[in-house]
Amino acid sequence: MPAIVLVGAQWGDEGKGKATDLLGSQVDYVVKPNGGNNAGHTVVVGGDKYELKLLPAGILSPNSVPIIGNGVVVNLEALFEEIDGLQARGADTSRLLVSANAHLVAPYHQVLDKVTERFLGKRAIGTTGRGIGPSYADKVARLGIRVQDIFDESILRQKVEGALRQKNELLLKVYNRRGIEVDEIVDYFLAFAERLRPMVVDSALVLNNALDEGKLVLMEGGQATMLDVDHGTYPFVTSSNPSAGGSCVGSGVGPTRIDRVLGIVKAYTTRVGAGPFPTELFDEWGVYLQTTGGEVGVNTGRVRRCGWYDAVLARYASRVNGFTDYFLTKLDVLTSIEKIPVCVAYDVDGVRHDEMPMSQSDFHHATPIYEEFDGWTEDITAARTFEDLPINAQNYVLALEKMSGTRISAIGVGPDREQTIVRNDLIN
């Protein structure tokens, strides 16, 4: 049985949680392959709103096994706070599995994240300050601490000593902060060991065995394509690869086992944090999209920057991910807008670009070239088939489909699980 990859096509917050939750009832395993507790999802089930940060959205699907994959960086304190919060609301978290190879976010990663951002001043990236970048940096520098390490105190201590030898020099001599004691970090991790132990598995083995047995696996990517460290708006990106290829690395499932790559794209565009954003709105329409769409970050509470749909960006995301389908979310937010602009190309210093500019400098200077589409006033939140939509809403979707280079197979017309139009089967 093949695997399905789900990826954000913009700068995150596209509604991946809703899509994962919708598909989670039809799959056997849902794995989060990248990111940390900086990659939140909002899921609405039966009118109840759940804000997930580190846990896969599949945790709310009673028929699937949720897995935190090897490509995730795990803040154990945040993990158990989230588990406890769900359990208090009656959710079953007993099926959760965690990769033994996943790296851990240490308290010193969070300290370094915050002081580094302050040190950068105007050049700050706009991180969540949760230690995600420094944790990934240690992983690549071979100074990281993995889940499996906390079950061997001797190895854990050696690794913490090695990491702090470097970190304390930075804290003391560059940032004028106090050093961190080895015992403090070792004790911090050991306090979680026994509660974590029953969840820890060889996740790549579990997932590949499941595929061999004919089970269906969904890979739920965190963040989004334009935040990919290789393919995003560098350096205003995350520290992992939330594009489709990164799902293979972060789960241990090879690319030949993937059958569908589903891109999640909002009917307009949003971004949290710093960095270029060609269609960003600074007028009343930006405020309208923000308030009507409830555009506030799940993790940080930061108001999201809002803009019109960017078809150039959507084509780029389709190309680098190899999307087979798009899931268009939040179409209902556009209701009552008389004329809806869509960015069809960029103008860079008088030169038209129909595709993403090659250089970051050009992208920084890109201004949108818009085409307008007639809007609709009818309430679409009860629509369950494409034909239920007003003709102008249908035309808008079909235009985006043509411009974005990938068929739109599902449309979100409200926040709830049931408020979805399925045009093409997303599983088979």
Image: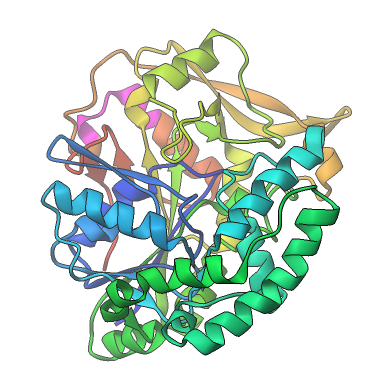
Residue at (81, 50) in percent of width and height:
358
Note whether 291 is above or below 203 in the view shown: above
Query: Residue 105, how many percent across, how many down?
Result: 53, 63
Note whether 228 is above or below 119 in the view shown: below
Query: Residue 253, how many percent across, how many down?
Result: 44, 82
Q: Nearer the viewer, residue 48 or 314?
A: 48
- Residue 124 in sight in this render: no
Rendered-image quadrant of the C terminus: bottom left
Q: Is 184 displayed left or right of 370 in the figure?
A: left
Q: What residue span does the magenta drawing correspond to?
A: 387-395
Write down the quadrant of residue 165 in the picture.
Answer: bottom right
Residue at (52, 29) in percent of width and height:
304
What colour scheme has been applied to the protein in the rendered image?
A: rainbow
Query: Residue 341, how many percent across, how many down?
Result: 55, 21
Note whether 148 is above or below 287 in the view shown: below
Q: Main secondary structure of the magenta part?
A: helix
Write down the quadrant of residue 221 in the picture.
Answer: bottom left
